[in-house]
Image (spheres, helix red, strand yellow):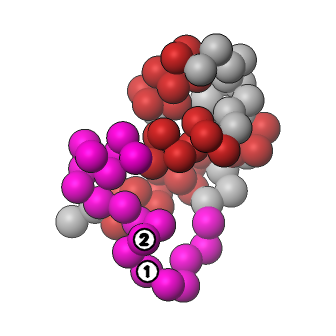
Amino acid sequence: MAQFVQVATERHKQLAPLSDSLVLLDSGLDSLCFAIIVARLEEALGCDPFAATENIQFPITLGDFIKFYEDAVP
């Protein structure tokens, strides 16, 4: 969640209040912001769950996004 706040601040985006039920498309972030978040998380965690499997169901909410990473990180 800290990455969401940091990227929103850096990119001058108005971030919606963060909660597990927040729909990512309603977060106030654009695709570049999400790409930055994913790249930073890959660097920090050593894992990119989006590249790890062919059959993925993309996260819809912030809670889904967090669980997606929790399930992928070894």
Percent position of residue 49, x then y: 41, 66
The residue carrying mark 1 is 53
Question: Mark 2 near mark 1, Cβ–Cβ under 8 Å?
Answer: no
Q: At which x and y percent is residue 63?
A: 56, 49
Compared with 7, 23 (above or below) is below
User: Percent position (x, y) of residue 16?
Assistant: 71, 24
**Left/right of residue 40 with respect to residue 30 in the rendered view:** left
Between 55 and 36, the one nearer to me in the picture: 36
The disc labelled 2 sits on which kind of residue? Ala
Q: Is residue 31 left or right of residue 64?
A: right
Judging by the rendered image, the residue that carries numbered circle 2 is: 51
- Asked whether residue 45 is drawn in magenta, I would say yes
What amino acid is found at the position of numbered circle 1 in the picture?
Answer: Thr
57 shown above or below 22: below
Residue 33: percent from the left, percent from the top?
Answer: 58, 36
When asked about the image quadrant of residue 58, the answer is: bottom right
Secondary structure at badge 1 equals: loop
What element does badge 2 sit on?
helix
Residue at image coords 46%, 57%: 67
On-image quarter of the C terminus: bottom left
Residue sitting at the far bottom: 55
Which picture quadrant has residue 64? bottom right
Q: Residue furthest right?
A: 26
- Residue 18 visible somewhere in the drawing: yes
Residue at 25% from the left image edge and 43% from the top image edge: 44
Mark 2 burial class by Cα count in 10 Å: few <14, some 14-19, many 20+: few
Numbered range of the magenta stretch: 39-58
Is residue 66 rendered to the left or right of residue 58?
left
Q: What distance separates the C-alpha of mark 2 from that of mark 1?
A: 6 Å
The answer to whether residue 5 shows anywhere in this view is no
